[in-house]
Structures are given as structure tokens and as C-alpha cells.
Image (spheres, rainbow, N blue to C red):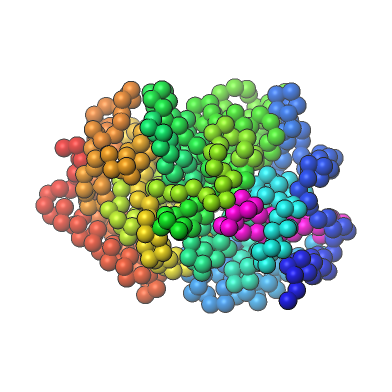
């Protein structure tokens, strides 16, 4: 059998024959290599140096204005059997997809350098980590992959040991939206991405490998690859519990992962540790618990809205060694975005003198790339090859109405339904309309590499693989009052909800049963020092059975779209909740205020 390095060499040769690069560079991940690439990008205008006094070693990249977000309509899962990709994915026959995209790759690297980027997703010595190699013609992608993954010589050595790796081929092509595809071939452990330089389309270790391909591998191997942050919460007694939380893109995962406790909690001894802000791989451990690693080594976070109020920890790590994409700049070359308290924009994200008539100064999906180690709240466990044990899984969406602040599933099966029933208002992280409610089960709509019906069945199979599974919760920070203002203060105050969640895990926090799950009463939440009226708390903790009945009917329609493949267990669970809601409405409990 040939070694993985031979396999890799042969693949690089094949790709070079197809794409015709002028040069081939094997990335070793060293600082010298990074410095050479940075100098090259500065010379080519791919990067602009930001103010070296206020922001040492920080750079700005301005993308093509037509290339600023993930392109879900051009993202395909190419399986032999269309049903394996499911109605939740765009599908193309693998042979047709290869032919279509290879025609675009033909000669696409002429005049360019082909970079070979070996990377490891997860701590380099973790049994849960997985490796890949991205071939790209974009030095910007190489620079970002160096921050976001364990990239270079160590990864190459591990690939040789592992005996397998995911192949990712990327070219920015012409950056023409009409010549753009992001294609996944899970059966071949292969990704091909053409025509975009944007993070989620081009940093192939992230969404393409760590979610779409990994979710497929996880199903085959009995683990979970999820769109979740991982956070450690230490209570005043010194016990740290780990929570994994799934929210759709641009719904505050980075802020929650780096939360700073409110003053009273800080003084009482609460502390929060960041393990990851976007992706979580969880494996059943020998103790029956789920153990999680963050496959990434950096953050690719949304800049707008990041401020001293919303996320002081993020702000503190953004003044050195950061790559910014599509933010605005001040007259003295500092990065700027909407929501920042200090400074005023002189140039917008496209480099034009700032004029509010052109829209926001920073693109709403402008980003920062920084190493996780730069985060003041980074967990001491971030490199632990064994991962961290997860006590609670939290699902959440952006919902103006109906969905209460927090609820707990009564058991794992109900929790899977809560995840499957998730819906959220869309954001700028993907192209398309913003603010429209769409079903986004487990925040995986854009990222699950296979049929959602099989994915839910896989989730439902976890009790047979792990005996001490986490409790499952659902939260909604985005509830609005009749005046259109958010009811819940959010940000650091979200710790109050996490306190209840860990209290449930400890067995110390109370709850009331409702048809949609267990909710805290006012006295079960620590609201001390918060300026909330009783009416606001009631609104946050009310179950509107009539409204939920309509919601669950819509959820039933959605689950029905997957036909007979949808697991019976989930349909039964849905029927149980629907019947409980109908019963509550019949008994005249159309609105259950849990305090009342
Ligand atoms: C991301 C996304 O970049 O979800 O994390 O779009
Ligand atoms: Mn994400």
C-alpha cells in the first residue's frame, strides 16, 4: 500500500496538471513563511497594513464586492444517491459535478502559485482530530488557514500516521459569481471550491471539512460534528461545567463563547472560559459522557456589533496580529465597524471615502481572523487532546416573538425535537434576504453534509452510544416587546440563563413543566440587579400554547417534507407535543404564564 505522502504527491501532481500553476509551494506553517506571504500580499495590494502603533501586525483585506458571504445556492453535496444528500442540500451527480468544476479549474492557476496547505482540525495529538490538505492559489486563504487550523509540518506528519486525509481543492478563479461552485463529495472525502475567496467558501477546513464532510464521517463513526460554540462555566464553588451551543450564523455565538459575567456574578466568583466559538466535535468517551474538541485554532468572527459592551474580550484581542476583511478604516488607519464606540470611518469597506448614502461603512458580514490563544478568556483546556466533557447542549435562534427565553427538554428525544424544530431570522452571513424566518435545525441547515432525516436518526441513536448524555435546552435572546425593543438585555446578562442551565445539571434549579418543555419560574432565575419589570419577565417566560400550536403544525409540515425517511421516533415525539398543546388550548390554558 502506498504511503499517504505518495497519495498526496500524486494528487498535487494531478491538480498541477489540471490547473497549470507557475509555481508550487508546500506550506510548513512557519513564521518565516507567514512573513514572506504577508510581504507578497502587501506588495500585490491583497492586504493593507493597519496603524502599526495602535494595531501592530494587523492587516485589512478588501474582497471583491461580489464575494462577501457564503453562497448557499452554489453549495452542493454530491453523493451517488440523491436521497443521501436529502432535500436540505443542493445535490449534483458526482461525475457531473467533477466535470463541471474541473472545467473551471482547467488552467485557472496560470501565472499563480499553487499552495499545498496540510492542516489538522483539532489538537494535533487528539484522537478526535482529523486532517486535511487544502490546495489553493490564494495567499489570503493560506494566511487565514494558518490562524484557523494547526497548519504545516506537524499536520503533514500526522497525515502520514493517520493514513487518510480530506482533499480540498480551491481556486479563486475570476471571482465571478456566475463561475462559482462549492462542491462536496463526502464519499470521496473531497471538496472542490471555485470562484470565491470568502472564508466559509474558501477556508476549506471550516464549514466544508469540519461540518459538511465531518458530519458525514461522524455519522459513520458514531460521533457528532456540530455548528456549536463550547464554553466552560465555573460556579463560585469552583466546579466547571461545559456547554455546547448551536445558533445560526451571526446570532452571537462568538459573544456567548467569550461572555464576561455581570458584576454581581463576577464578584460572587463566576468565571467563563472559551473553548470554541463555531464548531464542536463530540465523541462518546469511556465514561459515557460526550467529550468535545474545538476543531479550529482561531476565530473568524463577525466584526459589526463587536464592542466594549457586547464583547470586551473580542475587542481586547483585535488590536494585534489580526486579519480584518471588509471592515472600514479611520483616517489614521484603524479598523472600524458599526457598533464600535470609538473613532469614525474615513473609508468604507470598498475603500471609498465614507458616505452614509452608500450604506454601512463596514460590510455587515465583515470579519476578523485571530488565534484563539489571543482571547483573554481562552480555556486552559483548549489544547487538551481528550477534549472537555459536555453537560448541556443549548439550541437557540433569533425569534422576535413566541419563543420563550429558555426551556429545557424533558429528555434526549424531546431535545432532538427542540433542535430539529429550530427556526431563525436570516442574517448577513449568507447571501440572500435578511430577517426572514427559516427552519434551521440545530443551526445546521447550511452545513449538514447529508439528509436531515438521517441526521436526526443519528442524533436519536446517541443514547445507545453514550449513557451520560448532556441535558438539552433551547434559548432565545432576541424576543421583542410590543414597542419593538428587545425584552432581554442579552450579552453578559445571558450568564443568568446559563446559571439556571448549570443549576439544572446540578439538580439545584427549579422548573415548571409546560407542553413545550420545562421553564424556570421567575424565582428560579437569578435576576438580581436587572432592571426588568414583572410584565417583561412574564412575557419572557410565557408559553403561548395557541401560537405554539400553529408553530408545531408548521414544524410537522417541515418534518413531513422528508417523507418516510424521517425517523418514526421523531414523528411520535412531535405528535406528543402537538397533542399536549392542543390539550392545553382545550383546557383554556392558551397562555401559560409560568409564574402564575
Ligand atoms: C460562520 C458562519 O462564518 O456560520 O461561522 O457563516
Ligand atoms: Mn458559523
Nearest to the observer: residue 567 or residue 60: 567
- Stretch of the chain drawn in magenta: 109-138
Nearest to the observer: residue 404 or residue 261: 261
Position of residue 289 in the picture relative to residue 2 (left or right) = left
Q: Is residue 523 above or below residue 452?
A: above
In the picture, the quarter occupied by the N terminus is: bottom right
In the picture, the quarter occupied by the C terminus is: top left
On the image, the x and y values in percent for residue 124 come to 64, 52
Q: Is residue 143 above or below residue 308?
A: below
Identify the residue shown where x is 50% and y is 51%. Answer: 292
On the image, the x and y values in percent for residue 14 come to 80, 70
Position of residue 272 in the picture relative to residue 541 (left or right) = right
Identify the residue shown where x is 30% and y is 46%. Answer: 407
Q: Quadrant of residue 44?
A: top right
Nearest to the observer: residue 74 or residue 452: 452
Q: Is residue 114 magenta?
A: yes
Identify the residue shown where x is 42% and y is 42%. Answer: 241
Q: Is residue 437 magenta?
A: no
Identify the residue shown where x is 30% and y is 56%. Answer: 411
On the image, the x and y values in percent for residue 516 come to 26, 52
Answer whether residue 92 is visible to the viewer in this image: no
Q: Is residue 137 above or below residue 329?
A: below
Amino acid at each position: 500500500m502506498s504511503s499517504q505522502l505518495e497519495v498526496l504527491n500524486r494528487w498535487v501532481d494531478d491538480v498541477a496538471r489540471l490547473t497549470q500553476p507557475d509555481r508550487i509551494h508546500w506550506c510548513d506553517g512557519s513564521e518565516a513563511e507567514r512573513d514572506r506571504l504577508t510581504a507578497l500580499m502587501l506588495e500585490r495590494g491583497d492586504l493593507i497594513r493597519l496603524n502599526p502603533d495602535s494595531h501592530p501586525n494587523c492587516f485589512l483585506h478588501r474582497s471583491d464586492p461580489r464575494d462577501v458571504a457564503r453562497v448557499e445556492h452554489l453549495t452542493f453535496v454530491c453523493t451517488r444517491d440523491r436521497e443521501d444528500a436529502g432535500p436540505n442540500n443542493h445535490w449534483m451527480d458526482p461525475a457531473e459535478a467533477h466535470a463541471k468544476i474541473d472545467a473551471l479549474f482547467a488552467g485557472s492557476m496560470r501565472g499563480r502559485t499553487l499552495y499545498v496547505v496540510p492542516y489538522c482540525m483539532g489538537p494535533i495529538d487528539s484522537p478526535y482530530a482529523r486532517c486535511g490538505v487544502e490546495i489553493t492559489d490564494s495567499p489570503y486563504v493560506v494566511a487565514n488557514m494558518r490562524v484557523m487550523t494547526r497548519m504545516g509540518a506537524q499536520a503533514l506528519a500526522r497525515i502520514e500516521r493517520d493514513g487518510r486525509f480530506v482533499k480540498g481543492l480551491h481556486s479563486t478563479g475570476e471571482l465571478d459569481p456566475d463561475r462559482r461552485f462549492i462542491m462536496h463529495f463526502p464519499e470521496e472525502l473531497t471538496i472542490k471550491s471555485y470562484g470565491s475567496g470568502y472564508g466559509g467558501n474558501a477556508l476549506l477546513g471550516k464549514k466544508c471539512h469540519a461540518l459538511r464532510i465531518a458530519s458525514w464521517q461522524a455519522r459513520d463513526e458514531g460521533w457528532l460534528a456540530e455548528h456549536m460554540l463550547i464554553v466552560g462555566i465555573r460556579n463560585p464553588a469552583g466546579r466547571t461545567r461545559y456547554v455546547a451551543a448551536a445558533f445560526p450564523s451571526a446570532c452571537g455565538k462568538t459573544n456567548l463563547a467569550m461572555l464576561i459575567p455581570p458584576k454581581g456574578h463576577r464578584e460572587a466568583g463566576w468565571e467563563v472560559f472559551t473553548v470554541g466559538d463555531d464548531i464542536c466535535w463530540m465523541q462518546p468517551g469511556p465514561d459515557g459522557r460526550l467529550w468535545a474538541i474545538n476543531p479550529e485554532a482561531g476565530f473568524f468572527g463577525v466584526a459589526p456589533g463587536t464592542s466594549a459592551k457586547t464583547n470586551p474580550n473580542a475587542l481586547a484581542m483585535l488590536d494585534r496580529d489580526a486579519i480584518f476583511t471588509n471592515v472600514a478604516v479611520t483616517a489614521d488607519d484603524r479598523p472600524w465597524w458599526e457598533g464600535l464606540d470609538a473613532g469614525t470611518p474615513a473609508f468604507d469597506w470598498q475603500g471609498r471615502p465614507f458616505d452614509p448614502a452608500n450604506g454601512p461603512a463596514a460590510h455587515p458580514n465583515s470579519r476578523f481572523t485571530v488565534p484563539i490563544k489571543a482571547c483573554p478568556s481562552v480555556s486552559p483546556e483548549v489544547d487538551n487532546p481528550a477534549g472537555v466533557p459536555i453537560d448541556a447542549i443549548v439550541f437557540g435562534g433569533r425569534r422576535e416573538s413566541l419563543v420563550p427565553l429558555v426551556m429545557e427538554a424533558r429528555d434526549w428525544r424531546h431535545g432532538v425535537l427542540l433542535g430539529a424544530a429550530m427556526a431563525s431570522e436570516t442574517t448577513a452571513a449568507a447571501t440572500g434576504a435578511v430577517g426572514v424566518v427559516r427552519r434551521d435545525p440545530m443551526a445546521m441547515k447550511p452545513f449538514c453534509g447529508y439528509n436531515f432525516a438521517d441526521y436526526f436518526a443519528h442524533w436519536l441513536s446517541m443514547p445507545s452510544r453514550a449513557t451520560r448524555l448532556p441535558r438539552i435546552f433551547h434559548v432565545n435572546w432576541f424576543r421583542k416587546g410590543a414597542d419593538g425593543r428587545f425584552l432581554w438585555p442579552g450579552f453578559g446578562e445571558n450568564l443568568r440563563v446559563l446559571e439556571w442551565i448549570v443549576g439544572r445539571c446540578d439538580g439545584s434549579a427549579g422548573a415548571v413543566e409546560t407542553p413545550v418543555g420545562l421553564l424556570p419560574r421567575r424565582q428560579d432565575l437569578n435576576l438580581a440587579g436587572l432592571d426588568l419589570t414583572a410584565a417583561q419577565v412574564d412575557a419572557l417566560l410565557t408559553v403561548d400554547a395557541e401560537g405554539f400550536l400553529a408553530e408545531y403544525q408548521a414544524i410537522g409540515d417541515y418534518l413531513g417534507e422528508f417523507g418516510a425517511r424521517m425517523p418514526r421516533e421523531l414523528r411520535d415525539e412531535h405528535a406528543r407535543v402537538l397533542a399536549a398543546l392542543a390539550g392545553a388550548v382545550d383546557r383554556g390554558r392558551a397562555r401559560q404564564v409560568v409564574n402564575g
